[in-house]
Amino acid sequence: MATRKRKVTTKTIERLIRQKKYQQIRNLFEKYPEIDLAEACDNLEDKSKIVTIFRVVKSEHTADFFNFLDQDTKEYLIKAMSDKDVATLINTSKNDNIADFMEDMPANLVKKVLQNSSKEDRQIINKLLNYKDDSAGSIMTTEYLEFLNTTTIKDTIDEIRKIGKNAETIYTIFVKDTKRNFLGTVDLDDLIFAKVDETLEDIMNVDFVTVDVNTDQEQVAELVRRYDLNAIAVLNDDKRLIGIITVDDVIDVIQEEASEDLSLQAGIAPLEDSYTKTGVFKMAFKCIPWLLILLVLDVFSSMVISGFQAQIASVAILSAFIPTIMDTGGNAGSQTSSVMVRCLALNEFTNKDFFKVLWKEMRIAMLVALFTSIFAWVWFMIEMYCHLVDYSGPAGTVLTGFDLFLSRSGISLLVAATLFITIMIAKLFGYLLPWFAKLLHRDPALMSGPLITSIVDVSSLLIYFGLFELIKLGFGIQF
Amino acid sequence: MATRKRKVTTKTIERLIRQKKYQQIRNLFEKYPEIDLAEACDNLEDKSKIVTIFRVVKSEHTADFFNFLDQDTKEYLIKAMSDKDVATLINTSKNDNIADFMEDMPANLVKKVLQNSSKEDRQIINKLLNYKDDSAGSIMTTEYLEFLNTTTIKDTIDEIRKIGKNAETIYTIFVKDTKRNFLGTVDLDDLIFAKVDETLEDIMNVDFVTVDVNTDQEQVAELVRRYDLNAIAVLNDDKRLIGIITVDDVIDVIQEEASEDLSLQAGIAPLEDSYTKTGVFKMAFKCIPWLLILLVLDVFSSMVISGFQAQIASVAILSAFIPTIMDTGGNAGSQTSSVMVRCLALNEFTNKDFFKVLWKEMRIAMLVALFTSIFAWVWFMIEMYCHLVDYSGPAGTVLTGFDLFLSRSGISLLVAATLFITIMIAKLFGYLLPWFAKLLHRDPALMSGPLITSIVDVSSLLIYFGLFELIKLGFGIQF
């Protein structure tokens, strides 16, 4: 089991506030990470107590503490704080953290924050707020260490010591020339191994990857992961550094995107907050839209079955295999789409690979369809001969012996053939739809799971009844 | 778009080998990251060329280059290399990387590697090979920097310079006492900010989190993410440090677990390799098992429908709503299970929250079921009055006017009521099954998606026909 010194609880904090033991509260902040304290304070029954905590705690902890609180608590605090306190908070906080929580904040509070920011901070915050969601610009930080290429190692280290821990990361140092062009990066460990009289240019890593503000955050994450970076540079069109994205933010992006893909694949709108913090009503309305959309789409399946009512009435056994056909089709489609969603997310192939991968998928589909439908044919015969499914001939007739065998074989073969075609079509849609979503610049995961199921349902039913008619009319086979 | 200096291609490497431009190959390794070169070499048509590259390249690059090659290429190389070359490779590689690729290697190659390892390396590799898959032990590295608590900052920095870049990470330094008990960590930036005559104990962070070798890798990842760590300590039962896990390995774990959950949720066995590197046959056999299992499970649905053949024959319209009921039930169940899988993966709640969350889920289910079934009732009426679905009374009768309205309302109400109960049951199963999987120490994702769909199918059909009988017999309503 993972171990960590016992966690700070909401109860402890409530007790200390009640007993006015402010020095002990201050001590908590020396002992525990801000994220744990913030989580304990989120759950305080009386939110006004957080204002007390905020006044008591040393200013070096407040910015991080505030950053980890949940959105409601943040808004409560901004509302309750004096202008001066807000100004101090903004001043000690990172601009990207401020921009993050302002995105979902009501207009009057946004105004209060901006009015209490310095002119410079205000400009940066406004800029950050304008970047598209899920873009590199929206997750980058504007605080980083940038040095001239001619700076010596000694001067660099002295300067870092002077600046202190204010920059988001000192693990990667960014190097520019006198024209502010971005040249490369130096890792902190390279700094330690270098001779003190070398310059940054001597030791810098020029084989860097960079992104621009509009790069998708998922792509940023993949680059950082692939090249094991501590931080990646975000450049503007003039190739000048305007921000950096650090590895800890990248981890959050990866978690967030994974949760989002998983949700979309299950037909549920992604949660903005954790499950525990999302209310019952909000959760329900994350579930309902897709259920309704899919319910309406299912009308096509109903229309198909309704159109073939006569056939079902004469050979009622036909309906017994509808669930199997629908499920197998849906499952086969989801399998392919989930693989495609993942590959597209990780940039495993580019647009020019479209036909190559299509060809591969079709060969996979052929194998899966062949194997499954042969198995199914045998399995359906077993189902009927073991009387799991009752069938002894069309309505009004009772067949026996070889006639019964022929008729049962016909039904099994019909369902198996339907499965074969259904699986092929399901895998084709499972392949095409995520690409289609990508083409429309939507999340490929949106087009997987339930949507595929509904589309495949209709096609599989059409194939089923179509084949039935074809075999009956074309070959005069007696079911 | 993300930019990086143009990538090295397989063609370039093939050309350089053909022209015997070995110096230029050597230069490539100075210019490009090993991961890019390894990827280009994986695709070489003639694998024997890689042996040439291996001989040409400077030894400082070979270990990383080898590490990034795919499993087949690695095995080919080990087979082709002389004992002496293998010994050099093992010696310069990190033990955890060696253990990783040995896990899937045939026995004769494992023997060749172990025979050419030093006694010390052999012991560590054997130990690493014995840790459970997905445990902290299986992803930790045994190379790290550990210093006595009384070491001064100056001595520490001097020592680090001497050791050089051999340790996996120098960003986190681990501190022990003379009895080898683990005391805390020092981040590299703290080292730079500290005064040279302070000791590690003065500046170390004692508010550390640690894990043991059996901690699940997903839990390790969550701790590293939560506390923004560079590396986390792995302790044995005596609280002594035996390995560390670095943030770049954690990112890989998060990606891998996310892909795995997504695959399981779609009923496809997780891929060990990337899609591109997995062959058509292997891909097909990742898909087939779940399709067959679910196909067999669908027999229960067939049995239910088969048992109600008489009812379907008399009111054929009943079968038209089967797809809608099945899809909605399956979708509602997957929604809940996907949320639960994610929450359990991120440790959002513990076992004692079981009933609290159950109560929350049931309230959500009630809202979703109520809203969806009311909508469905209206929608089914529209379907019938717009003749999307044909129904003008039971077989043999043609109702009109108010009688037709009553009969249609009855059908709509029957389906809507079925949907209500089905959604409640689906969400209950969607909640229970992932917990059940956790109880059995299996991946919760295994119990979501397709399996839920198949279970909900049977129950929804039973409810459907059960309600039909109940309403017909109990209330004497004419459909």
Image: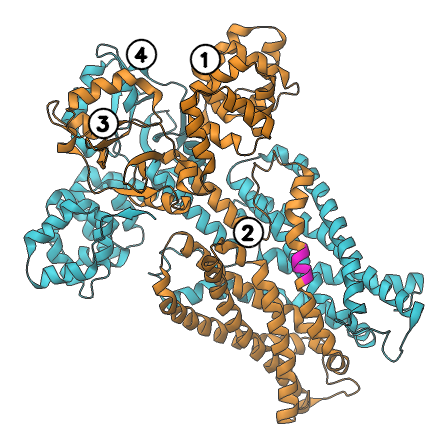
Chain colours: A cyan, B orange
- Which residue has dot 3 on it? B147
**CA separation in Å, label 1 and label 4:** 22 Å
Residue A7: which disc? none
Region rendered in magenta: B292-296
Residue type at numbered disc 1: Ser
- Say yes or no: labels 1 and 4 on the same chain: no
Chain of the residue under label 3: B
- Which residue has dot 4 on it? A202
Q: Is residue A45 visible?
A: yes
Q: Answer with mark 3 or mark 2, whichever residue precedes in sequence.
A: 3
Taking the image as shown, residue B281 lies to the left or right of residue B444, namely right
Do tag 3 and tag 2 residues touch (Cβ < 8 Å)? Answer: no
Residue B255: x and y, percent?
A: 46, 41
Q: Mark 2 or mark 4: which is in front?
A: 2
Residue type at numbered disc 2: Leu
Residue A403: x and y, percent?
A: 93, 69
The 10 Å Cα crowd at callout 1, few under 14, some 14 to 19, many 20 or more, is few
**CA separation in Å, label 2 and label 1:** 41 Å
Residue B118: x and y, percent?
A: 44, 20
User: For this rendering, which residue is in front, A294 or B296?
Assistant: B296
**Residue B394 appears in which quarter of the rendering?**
bottom right
**CA separation in Å, label 3 and label 4:** 30 Å
Which element carries disc 4, helix, strand or loop? helix
| Quadrant position of the C terminus of chain B in the picture | bottom right
Q: Is residue A346 magenta-colored?
A: no
- Which residue has dot 2 on it? B264
Q: Answer with mark 1 or mark 3, whichever residue precedes in sequence.
A: 1
Q: Mark 1 or mark 4: which is in front?
A: 1
Would you place residue B357 above or below residue A342 in this image? below
Taking the image as shown, residue B250 lies to the left or right of residue A327, namely left
Q: Mark 2 or mark 1: which is in front?
A: 1
